[in-house]
Image (tube, rainbow, N blue to C red):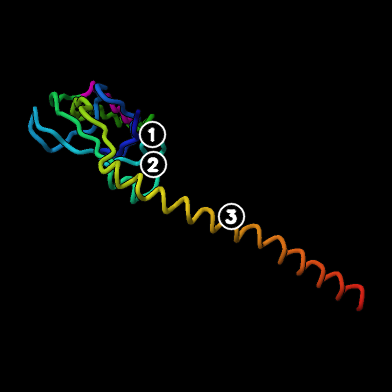
Amino acid sequence: MYAIVKTGGKQYRVERGQHLLVERLAAEEGASVALQPLMYRSDETVFDADGLAQVKVTAKILGHERGEKLRVVKFKPKRGYKRRTGHRQELTRIEIVDIALGGKGAARKAAKPAAASKADTEAAASAKPATAKASEAAKEASENGA
């Protein structure tokens, strides 16, 4: 079971127990945070907004860190222009505590009416070719008569 979550403008594939280094989260060390799921995969795959509203991805903040130093150099030849600056990204180390599909009973109940509607759509789909054949026959008749 895994989920694709979005945090800090990036997407991550996460599983229970996994440790991640993400953009700085505004919460204290040891706090639990909920991450926004974009996809859930277990026995079934959930992409739609209604299904994702039931998916809960919980993470525990292990600590706040800073990334490695990046050197930024600006240089223009023959002008004596040199600039060197640095940057260290603020990061948060998290552990994925739980990935759960809440209301599994509701999802199964919703699946049964969906099966009935699937039968209706199959019946409608089988009716479409007959009307398509009729419309093709009408086109051929009009072409032959003209």
Q: Report crowding for label 3: few under 14, some 14 to 19, many 20 or more residues within 10 A (C-alpha).
A: few
- Determine which residue is flagged by label 1: 41
Kindly report the distance in space between the C-alpha atoms of the residues bearing marks 3 and 1.
Answer: 27 Å
- Label count reads 3
Quarter of the image where the C terminus is located: bottom right
Name the residue located 15 percent from the left edge and 24 percent from the top edge.
65
Q: CA distance from mark 2 to mark 3?
A: 23 Å
What x and y, as percent, mark residue 46?
39, 41
Report helix, strand or loop for mark 1: strand
**Residue 1: quarter of image:** top left
Magenta part of the protein: which range? 67-74
Q: On the image, numbered disc 2 is attached to which residue?
A: 46
Viewer-nearest of labels 2 and 3?
A: 3
Q: Identify which amino acid the numbered label 3 is placed on.
A: Glu
Q: Main secondary structure of the magenta part?
A: strand
Dots 3, 1 in contact, CB < 8 A: no
Q: Secondary structure at mark 2?
A: strand
Residue at position x 35%, y 48% in the image: 109
Residue at label 3?
122
N-terminal of the two: label 2 or label 3? Answer: 2
Q: How many neighbours does mark 2 have within 10 angstroms: few (below 14), some (14-19), or many (20 or more)?
A: some
Q: Residue furthest bottom?
A: 146
